Amino acid sequence: MSDTIAAAATGNTVSAIGIIRLSGPEAITIAEKLFEPASGKPLSSYSDRLLVNGRLCGNDGRTLDNCLAVISRAPRSYTGEDTAEFHCHGSPVVLRCALDNIFSAGARPAAPGEFTKRAFLNGKTDLVQAEAIPDLLEAQTEEAAKNAAGQIGGAISRKISAIYTGMADAASHYYAVLDYPDEDIEPFHTDRFIEVFRAAENELRKLAAGFERGKIMTAGVKAAIIGRPNAGKSSVLNALLGFDRSIVTDMPGTTRDTVEEKLVFGGVLFRLIDTAGLREPKDKAESIGIERTREAAKDAGLVIAVFDGSVPFCDEDAETVITAGQAPKSLALINKSDLPQAAGFETLGSRFDAVCAVSALTGEGFDAAEKATALLFPSDFPVPSGEILTNHRQADAVNRAVEFAAAALEAAIKGMTPDVILTEAEGSVAALGELLGKNIREDIVSRIFSRFCVGK
């Protein structure tokens, strides 16, 4: 990391403020070449993290913008290197011209996530904290944003570091006794570490159990909207989304394939899937669509079954009830509540987790449906913000650490030899080290940071 990188840390659209970031050994030198403080003093004479008013110039000396600059010297910076930032007016043209001049002065364009990658490699952040940054940027619910912010603040890292230290202490004590038998070192007593292993296993199991909730926060619950043709499935989808996503006509069988959109409903992120109507197919294309409807219901975490409440319950509605039963949770929406209601829907309460009368035309009943949906997906147990695992890499490392910690505990309780116990303890330490990024392959690190946007 002997070179200096630069990038815009804000988007390529017109905005109030546009930020350009530099990091590397020449960051402050390059910034000083292009920025003239209003005071007349050189930029490098200012203290770290102090906003300085002045003029951003091109290499030809002409003004590009009147803006603010700030510098931070290594190692007390985000990346652990010398850094500089220009806080400009948010004109994409200004930012582009400024970057062109910065590159001409000796910096190079930053790769996606390279600022945070340098912070990780310089020990300013661990891998769990780094991974939470794109989670925060991409958060679609308040819970997801709070969890990501907590992870950036070190909620998981502190918990894992304490477990890591306890397990590593057990291993180091054993090796100290083994390697230095003549030294005055307290003998290795298995009983002393039983509680360490037990506490580690318990805490790690709690973390691992939260991953299912983490998947819902980041990926959402797959929710299939099913029902007979013209029950109003597409109208319900459009009403939920607040815009016309699916085609709505009076002609049955308009929806031939699945249509997917994301929606936060009842505080839960859903991947809504509008499906083909359930009936005897009229042609091959419709037959394929109906089969996909059944598959979508099987794979869904929630089925939203839509019924036309203005006409009597029929065989196609009965097929909808049967198909909805394949999902772990189901919600029945009796649509067209703005019209006179027909009979036959009284028994749905015994077949669905919740039943609500709604009108996709007027919006009536959707507030009640939202509350009912929230009750279907409560938090299974209270987890502090920041302590919910959100990706498979983290979950895999924690699960391996749990298995090793449990094996170490079992070996200790059974009174097995210290070398057997410590083999398991070291396995747990290695898995936790991988979680935090203490020992992880470079190709995995590169894949993790490739997910980031440029400027982060």
Image (cartoon, helix red, strand yellow):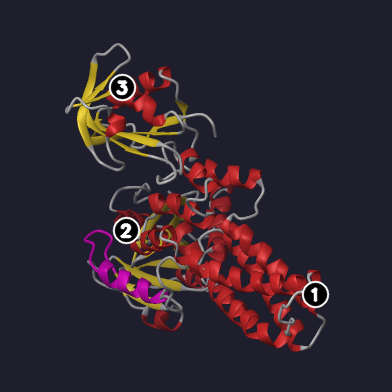
**Mark 1 to mark 3 CA distance (whole Å):** 64 Å
Q: Which portion, as a residue range, is magenta?
A: 358-376
Q: Name which residue type carries label 1.
A: Asp
Closer to the observer: label 3 or label 2?
Answer: 3
Q: Answer whether residue 417 is visible to the viewer in this image.
A: yes
Q: Position of residue 106 (x, y in %)?
A: 45, 21
Q: Name which residue type carries label 2.
A: Leu
Sort mark 1 into few (<14), some (14-19) or many (20+) by Cα contacts within 10 Å. Answer: few
Q: Earlier in the sequence, mark 3 or mark 2?
A: 3
Lateral position of residue 372 relative to residue 222, left or right: left
Lateral position of residue 443 relative to residue 360, left or right: right
Name the residue beneath numbered marker 1. Answer: 182
Does the stretch in magenta take in 363?
yes
Q: Residue at x 48, y 57 (%)?
A: 219
Q: Name which residue type carries label 3.
A: Leu
Name the residue beneath numbered marker 2. Answer: 240
221 over 99 or under it: above or below: below
Sort mark 3 into few (<14), some (14-19) or many (20+) by Cα contacts within 10 Å. Answer: many
**Mark 1 to mark 2 CA distance (whole Å):** 74 Å
**Splitting the image into 4 quarters, where does residue 357 fall?**
bottom left
Q: Quadrant of the N terminus?
A: top right
Q: Position of residue 242 (x, y in %)?
A: 28, 53
Mark sitting on residue 34: 3
**Splitting the image into 4 quarters, where does residue 339 fall?**
bottom left
